[in-house]
Image: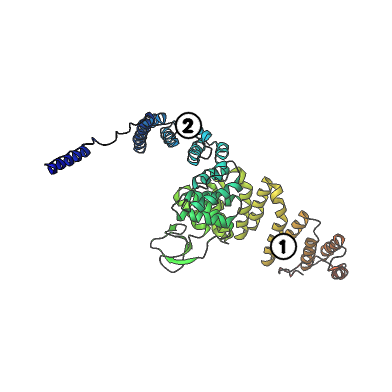
Amino acid sequence: MKRFRMIVLGAVLAAAGATGYAAAPATVPTTQEMQASKAELLFTEGRDALYRREFDKAIDLLGKAAAEDPSKTTYRLHLARAMQYSGKAAEAEKLLSDILKASPDHVEAGQLLGEIFAKKEDWKAVVALLDPLLKYRHDYATYHLLAEAKYNLGDSETARKYYEEAIKLNPSSAADHYQLGNIHLAGNCFALAAESYQNALRLGLSSPILHYKLGSAYFNLRNYFGNIVTITVKSGAPGTISESFYLIEPVPGQKDVFRAAPASSAIYHVAKAIADGIGDRADIQFLRANIYLNAGRYQQAYEMYKKMQPSIPKEDLPLFFYYYAQAAFGVGQYEEYLSLLQEAIKLNKAAYQPTLVEAYVKVAEQYNQNGQLDKYVDYLAKAVNESPQTAALHLKLGIAYEEASKFTEAVVEWQMVLDLEPDHPKRLDLLNLIAKHREKPTTQPTAQPVQTR
């Protein structure tokens, strides 16, 4: 009987434990805990709505979550994101500003607010906001926004440093490489510009303007046609792009075989920019002609300049006429060369007048090489008239007169050399020549090149 009572008692105790009769009373949640739980639920639902692009719903839920638990900065930050996405930038700006007042080191809030300022192109506000945040975290987004702000404010040097830091943290940003290339190009750091533009292309950024700028960088590096190779292209045409080559010209006697410039050349990227849709721009056509000119392909350059003249903007005409003149000289059009140079001088005397003396001498030398002694003398005389106090020109003209058997004129030129430079290195030689030819009669010369002393 005693054993039976013990078994029954054990069963009762076990049952009591199973039903909780003997457990301590449950703790009743506090009002604060209930609010926090409700806020967390609202936040979760609001965040899901945000990333489902249900922005109005997200704003409603996240606003309620923030009201339930104002201590949670995360709730307000997501609310600001929802507001920004829905176009309520002013409300987002106020909310983020309040977060930063309470927590000046809140980097995420600062970056989001910085994006809002950047969209408004308030670059000074971006700098004022984000510069102090660098001491809390070296973050890509911060450096990127600061770089853009400094670039747009004209502070290229600081922008360069920020872009370089941004690229260290995110090497795959093609846009940052491109902007860094723009800074290098503007600063005449052409090798660095080319490297940055190449990185942007490698990372998938491609546009006619990018190709044009890379072509400009290569041009200034004197990389006009690169290492020219010979390739076979079925039905190819000179002046066009074929995969990673620019077809310069056909190889005579070989069907479908072309001399070609590689992608690492100025002409390739300029031609690519033209092919991609900006061929009607005068500046890119001008650059293309300049590439041919500087590569010594004068005939093609001359034809390009002649064709594009009507489209050149007025402000670019002086430089255009100067380069056009060089092409005319290259194809042996010496009178046209001087005529075009005079056009450049008319439009910008300060820049191009000093080139006229050298131009006369260049033309004179060409006529001398062609055996046209009379024109050689005429153009040397023009050079002297343009720069009458240059002893070297008087000396050269005196020798030309001597070869032309115009001894009286020669003596006058040599005497002027000594008047200008009494201690001239060839003083004694000139005195002897003056004495030798002073009384000689002038005779008609034979047309032979002058051997200058």
304 or 175, nearer to the observer: 175
Neighbourhood count class around disc 1 (C-alpha, 10 Å): few under 14, some 14–19, many 20 upward: many
Could you tell me which residue is drawn at 13 percent across and 44 percent down?
3
Sooner in the amino-acid sequence: mark 2 or mark 1: 2
Circles 2 and 1 in contact, beta carbons < 8 Å: no
Residue 334 x %, y %: 65, 58
Nearest-to-viewer mark from 2 and 1: 2
Could you tell me which residue is drawn at 78 percent across and 55 percent down?
387
Q: Residue furthest left?
A: 1
Left or right: 351 as drawn, with respect to 263: right
103 or 26, nearer to the observer: 26
Please determine whether, in this image, residue 113 is positioned above or below residue 266.
above
Mark 1 lies on a secondary structure that is helix
Residue 411 x %, y %: 84, 64
Task: State how far apart marks 2 and 1 are (Cα).
Answer: 82 Å
Residue 179 x %, y %: 53, 48
Residue 420 visible somewhere in the drawing = yes
Q: Residue furthest front?
A: 2
Could you tell me which residue is drawn at 37 percent across and 28 percent down?
31
132 or 32, nearer to the observer: 32
Residue 301 visible somewhere in the drawing = no
Residue type at numbered disc 2: Leu
Residue 25 x %, y %: 29, 33
Which residue is identified by label 2? 95
Which residue is identified by label 1? 376
Left or right: 114 as drawn, with respect to 329: left
Residue type at numbered disc 1: Tyr
Mark 2 lies on a secondary structure that is helix
The quadrant the N terminus occupies is top left
